[in-house]
Amino acid sequence: MSVFLTSLAIVVGVYVLIYYNIFKGSRCTSNVRLKGKTAIVTGGNTGIGKATAMELARRGARVVLACRNKQRAEGAVFDIRRESGNNEVVYMHLDLANLKSVRSFAETFLKTEPRLDLLINNAGMMGPGRTEDGFGMAFGVNHLGHFLLTCLLLERLKQAGRSRVINVAALLHRLGSIDFATLSNHCDLVTGQSSWHSFRAYCHSKLCNVLFTRELANRLEGTGVTCYSLHPGVINTEFCRHMALWQRLLFLPFAKLFFLDPEAGAQTTLHCALQEGIEPLSGRYFSSCAVQELSAKARDDAVARKLWEVSERLSGLS
């Protein structure tokens, strides 16, 4: 029995060390109120997007949930209004896998909403397939759709004076790379559709998020609009719903033990959106509510500039 208890104590101790030193994140401490401000949260109907939208609503913001699934988005609107006591929460249709939908969303928003203070590019996915425009799904949704959306809304952001763009990236950007020849030949950053290719495509798309943020900051210098990319932590959400069943079954126990819940996962997003005094850090990358250093490939301004130019062409902006 003593051997069993000793082994159990060791297992529990290792779990606590791993959880609190690797997985558990910090919390946003800002007390900023957002009355009179407007925020867009892509993918705001579930996971960390919904948790982010909930907190923004609690602080008094008008929150637009930009989502693909109408039924689930309307359910999220109902939940957020009820729990926050804020009725200024609305749904607008946005399918990031369809550039026509992105343009339609932007057109509708600009016609109906007089201001934009926070654009939170939160939606993301990992899985095979192609977008409506023929791009790899992870590249098209995680990067290109958000790139076009941001560009179409930049003037409205500038009009607000002090506004912010938040790009939810991931620590896995460290495993990413950008092969412009592959992108040109395959409309994707990978050449296949296997589970391994899907994982690689996700890593590449998250590197795109980080580099897009750097180039966006360079182009916005002096405008009053700042931008930040971030790693939200390792979150137990519906993100991996596109995985094969056997992969989800292997993934679930680990997720339940170690991964953050959506509210905890939203904290770094909220820090980047709300924390006063971080404007000089525009273009930087955050994790656990603190700025982090990046690898050389994630700081390559020449690649970031080329990615911007290629993204303009692929999205029809040039």
Image (cartoon, grey):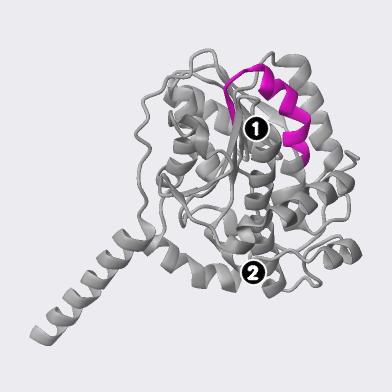
Q: Using the rendered image of the protein, determine whether residue 139 is visible from the camera's viewpoint.
A: yes
Q: Residues within 10 Å of mark 2 (few under 14, many from 20)?
A: few
Say which quarter of the image contains residue 106.
Answer: top right
Left or right of 109? Residue 253 is left
* Quadrant assignment for the N terminus: bottom left
Q: Pick whichever of labels 1 and 2 is earlier in the sequence.
A: 1
SS of the residue under disc 1? loop
Q: Residue at x 84, y 51 (%)?
A: 310
Per the image, the residue denoted by label 2 is 244
Q: Which residues are magenta?
A: 148-164
| Vertical order, 140 against 53 (above or below) | below
> In this view of the protein, which residue sits in the foreground, 280 or 109?
280
Per the image, the residue denoted by label 1 is 221
Q: Using the rendered image of the protein, determine whether residue 241 is visible from the camera's viewpoint.
A: no
Say which quarter of the image contains residue 268.
Answer: top left
On the image, the x and y values in percent for residue 273 come to 50, 33
Left or right of 186? Residue 19 is left
